[in-house]
Image: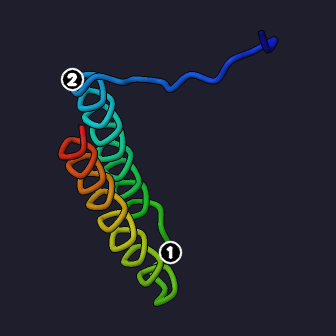
Amino acid sequence: MPPFSLSPILIEKGVLGSILAVVLVVFVVMSLVFRYHWREFGLPTPVFRAMKRWYFIVSTILATCAVAFYLAILLTL
């Protein structure tokens, strides 16, 4: 018998959904904090405005991908 064995980690649908929900809530709260901080203390330069825009574009894409992958995992379970 080998000293270790590989076994798949099984995560139930509810646990996976809960993890996704917590991550998305933390992500939204942090984005709101960033937005407030940038509005109050940010520099009014074109580069800074572009950086804020890119942050929200990329973060929206990543959050959408996370939800899409979650739904894809649910369909394959």
Q: Pick the residue in front: 32 or 58.
A: 58
Residue linked to disc 1: 43
- Residue type at mark 2? Gly
Q: Disc 1 to disc 2, how far (Cα)?
A: 43 Å
- Give how far across and how far down residue 11 sits, in percent: 36, 24
Badge 1 amino acid: Leu
Residue drawn at point x = 41 percent, y = 54 percent: 34
Residue that sits furthest to the right in the current view: 3
Which residue is painted at 20% across and 49% down in the image? Answer: 71
> In this picture, is 70 found above or below 48?
above
Q: In which quarter of the image is the C terminus?
A: top left
Q: Quadrant of residue 35?
A: bottom left
In this picture, residue 2 sits left or right of residue 38? right
The correct choice, above or below, for 77 with respect to 11 in the image is below
Quadrant placement of the N terminus: top right
Badge number at residue 14: 2
Q: How many marks?
A: 2
